[in-house]
């Protein structure tokens, strides 16, 4: 037996030396011969290898091996320079001290999943695009080579043409790069890289040389390679095994990143970050298995020696098993084998019952969906099945933080964070018809069994079922947000608080709705403006501070519950800040009489209140506008007659100021006067907002400005004294100037911008002169030493210019001395 084995082995070696080109065939024959006692030399299968593919010339293999060992760009490749923004980004990543380098695998798997999604979508209308055999398998494969220190990630996705490689890996959107770099500089959190569309470059956290081999159906196979030194190269691939279709990324790992050549480490990362990827992820894993092999002669003789030493009883037992002993003797040996191991075998979370899914699984799924792998959990989520004419399953999440660009180009950008699936097949994540713009902060997934598969995206957008899905999604989304508020102990009434505390979740949910409002409150306000159908639902979600909320957020329902008896309107005021509004003269009498007033300090609030006219049969009243009613005003009517001459005179004195009327005020307590606007015109805050617009047109804004009305406090001493002066001499110019000064002061205090600040300043200075007993005709002393000062200035500037020259000469002299 041994002699035959040795002869066979020598013969095989001779054939290999004589026939090098037939080595592949001999290997195949050796594997086919199950009786061969010697294990054939193992040839490791390459990822994506095509049976009977192109043979590789030995010279090419040698040449490429040398190139890879040097980790230098191939001399025959076409060289390119990275875009400046990309180089800047790569410098940050390469020189980063960021400890969590694990994210590179997450980003590559995410990109591979996107490529697979694209080819699967295209296959809905063109089944031949997938090809046949292994090419039709939509999967992700990970393989490692410990000897060469190479980690490979392969997908059978859409692949990239040469132009795609240049565009996608050499130049990227400047906005995404700049936004990421800015975020890095402020927070230093590289974990967000995937959200900015630049996740591929995270490979340079662990690799100093990267190859991207890609094959698109419309182009030849190409290789992109770079050492992250400001340049990359692309060449037609004639040496690697044909991929068929898809992309393989080879990372030549750094010395300090050798841990990523360990199978257990890769399994751990896939489990952590990519468990819910919708395509199978396979790892080329090795494992030890026990195998029965024929026993050799030495082993047989050992067995015979052991048999002689056995007792008679054992001999009898052996005799009884005489038939079994006639069988060929074998032994069990451990053998190392390699095979593809599936790493993500978790069922799609949205297909499971909500009762079966744990909070940890929801959080992991959210992180996978959002490409946000921080420690924070989503604020809340909703997992539901819709039945009826249109059946679908959906999962919606409220992120813990608002995206950095949530409200940038709000009305121009068509972006959605919802992924649409049809019968578990990914269709698109660009359907802005599924949710209105004001809910575009929600993340999630919709899987419908009703929508058709084999239609274009444009036709699908017009499908009638989408309207039904959208309607149900909005309702579920608003219910989810309402429930978040109801479960927050800070939002509950005393009775509800006890119920929430008894449930045991009070600490975790405490303050959650306030956090939601601070992040996404503006979206709810935009919803009230845009969505008339759900306006009342959205109004229930509004939060704001008031004169009685002690710095906490409150709701319209709580405001109405605290309203005074006989109060018919909901009072509010708009401005730039809560501090400014708290000291506003418009609130003096309201606070004195115990009325509660809502503070609106967001610029969008002015637009909001143009659409939110009432709530629960209560009208909204801006306390800085006309029409404010505070109970019975019989005393005010009695005073009107006595102040009739003053109000008439004052209106005439302010004719040049475009004052519509002068009236007695019911809203003032300590201030002499205030300026209000007409009920349907702009408030002072709205005027300020419109004037600050970049492309505002002052001539057109005049039509929207509210008519200004001066309201005076008949109980104030200044107003009483002015009334007496006017009664004594209506033509007194000093009294007229004083009346204009009072008006302009009230105009500023009411939040308006003065058209002629110089005129106002002149009146203030005149008043100061008068109080200091300075003559109105007193002139400013002229400056006598103007020329001398100019001469000194010229002299000092010359000295300054000459000083650098003197210093340079001195330095030159010192250098010469040293030499």
Image (cartoon, rainbow, N blue to C red):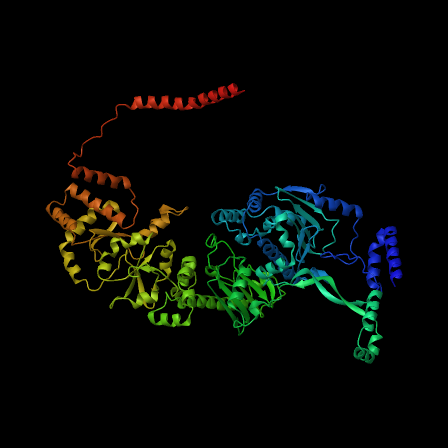
Asked whether, in this view, residue 244 is left or right of residue 511, the answer is right
Residue drawn at x 53%, y 59% is 370
Q: Position of residue 252 (x, y in %)?
A: 66, 49
The quarter of the rendered structure image containing the N terminus is: bottom right
Residue that sits furthest to the left in the current view: 728
Q: Position of residue 517 (x, y in %)?
A: 40, 60
Q: Position of residue 539 (x, y in %)?
A: 38, 64
Q: Is residue 709 visible?
A: no
Asked whether, in this view, residue 454 is left or right of residue 41, the answer is left
Relative to 653, does residue 493 appear above or below in the rendering? below
Of residues 654 and 467, the one nearer the viewer is 467
Residue 272, quarter of the rendered image: bottom right
Residue 248, quarter of the rendered image: bottom right
Of residues 510 and 542, the one nearer the viewer is 510
Figure label count: 0
Of residues 21 and 12, the one nearer the viewer is 12
Asked whether, in this view, residue 442 is left or right of residue 650, the answer is right
The quarter of the rendered structure image containing the C terminus is: top right
Of residues 108 and 617, the one nearer the viewer is 108
Q: Position of residue 197 (x, y in %)?
A: 56, 52
Q: Is residue 770 visible?
A: yes
């Amino acid at each position: 037996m041994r002699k035959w084995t040795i002869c066979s082995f020598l013969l095989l070696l001779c054939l290999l030396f004589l026939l090098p080109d037939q080595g592949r065939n001999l290997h195949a024959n050796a594997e086919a011969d199950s009786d061969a006692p010697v294990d054939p030399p193992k040839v490791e299968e390459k990822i994506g290898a095509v049976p009977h593919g192109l043979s590789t010339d030995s010279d090419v293999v040698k040449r490429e091996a040398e190139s890879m060992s040097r980790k230098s760009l191939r001399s025959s490749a076409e060289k390119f320079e990275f875009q400046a923004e990309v180089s800047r980004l790569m410098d940050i990543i390469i020189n980063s001290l960021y400890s969590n380098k694990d994210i590179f695998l997450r980003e590559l798997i995410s990109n591979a999943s996107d490529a697979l999604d694209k080819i699967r979508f295209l296959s809905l209308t063109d089944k031949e695009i997938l090809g046949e055999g292994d090419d039709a398998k939509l999967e992700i494969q990970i393989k490692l080579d410990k000897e060469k220190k190479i980690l490979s990630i392969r997908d059978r996705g859409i692949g990239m043409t040469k132009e795609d490689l240049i565009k996608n890996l050499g130049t990227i959107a400047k906005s995404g790069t700049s936004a990421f770099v800015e975020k890095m500089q402020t927070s230093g959190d590289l974990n967000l890289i995937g959200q900015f569309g630049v996740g591929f470059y995270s490979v340079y956290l662990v690799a100093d040389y990267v190859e991207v081999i890609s094959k698109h159906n419309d182009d030849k196979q190409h290789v992109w390679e770079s050492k992250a030194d400001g340049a990359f190269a692309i060449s037609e691939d004639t040496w690697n095994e044909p991929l068929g279709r898809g992309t393989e990324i080879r990372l030549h790992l750094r010395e300090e990143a050798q841990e990523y050549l360990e199978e257990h480490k890769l399994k751990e990362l896939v489990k952590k970050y990519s468990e819910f990827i919708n395509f199978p992820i396979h790892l080329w894993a090795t494992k030890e298995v026990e195998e029965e092999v024929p026993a050799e002669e030495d082993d047989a003789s050992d067995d015979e020696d052991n048999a002689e030493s056995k007792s008679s009883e054992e001999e009898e037992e052996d005799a009884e098993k005489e038939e079994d002993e006639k069988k060929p003797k074998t032994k069990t040996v451990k053998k190392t084998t390699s095979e593809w191991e599936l790493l993500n075998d978790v069922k799609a979370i949205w297909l499971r019952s909500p009762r079966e899914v744990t909070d940890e699984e929801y959080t992991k799924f959210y992180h996978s969906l959002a490409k946000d792998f921080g420690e924070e959990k989503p604020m809340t989520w909703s997992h539901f099945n819709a039945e009826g004419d249109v059946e679908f399953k959906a999962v919606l999440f409220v992120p813990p933080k608002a995206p950095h660009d949530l409200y940038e180009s709000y009305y121009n950008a068509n972006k959605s964070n919802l992924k649409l699936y049809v019968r578990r097949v990914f269709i698109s994540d660009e359907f802005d018809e599924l949710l209105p713009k004001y809910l575009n902060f929600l993340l999630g997934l919709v899987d419908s069994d009703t929508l058709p598969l084999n239609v274009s995206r444009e036709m699908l957008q017009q499908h009638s079922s989408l309207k039904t899905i959208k309607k149900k999604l909005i309702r579920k989304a608003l219910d989810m947000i309402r429930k978040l508020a109801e479960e927050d102990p800070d939002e509950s009434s005393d009775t509800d608080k006890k119920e929430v505390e008894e449930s045991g979740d009070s600490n975790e949910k405490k303050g959650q709705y306030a956090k939601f409002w601070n992040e996404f409150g503006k979206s709810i306000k935009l919803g009230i403006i845009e969505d008339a159908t759900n306006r009342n639902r959205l109004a229930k979600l509004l939060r704001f501070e008031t004169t009685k909320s002690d710095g906490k957020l409150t709701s319209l329902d709580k405001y109405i519950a605290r309203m005074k008896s006989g109060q018919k309107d909901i009072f509010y005021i708009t401005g730039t800040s809560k501090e400014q509004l708290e000291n506003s003269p418009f609130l003096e009498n309201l606070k004195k009489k115990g009325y509660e007033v809502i503070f609106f300090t967001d610029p969008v609030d002015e637009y909001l209140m143009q659409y939110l006219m009432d709530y629960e049969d209560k009208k909204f009243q801006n306390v800085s506008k006309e029409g404010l009613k505070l109970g019975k005003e019989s005393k005010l009517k009695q005073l009107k007659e006595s102040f009739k001459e003053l109000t008439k005179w004052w209106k005439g004195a302010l004719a040049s100021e475009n004052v519509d009327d002068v009236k007695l005020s019911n809203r003032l307590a300590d201030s002499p006067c205030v300026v209000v606007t007409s009920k349907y015109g702009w408030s002072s805050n709205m005027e300020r907002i419109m004037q600050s617009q970049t492309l505002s047109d002052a001539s057109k804004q005049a039509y929207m400005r509210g008519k200004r009305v001066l309201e005076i406090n008949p109980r104030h001493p200044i107003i009483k004294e002015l009334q007496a002066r006017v009664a004594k001499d209506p033509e007194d110019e000093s009294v007229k100037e004083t009346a204009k000064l009072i008006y302009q002061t009230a105009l500023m205090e009411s939040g308006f911008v003065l058209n002629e600040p110089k005129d106002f300043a002149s009146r203030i200075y005149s008043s100061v002169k008068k109080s200091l007993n300075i003559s109105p005709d007193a002139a400013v002393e002229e400056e006598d030493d103007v020329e001398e000062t100019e001469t000194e200035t010229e002299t000092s500037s010359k000295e300054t210019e000459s000083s650098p020259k003197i210093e340079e000469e001195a330095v030159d002299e010192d250098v010469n001395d040293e030499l």
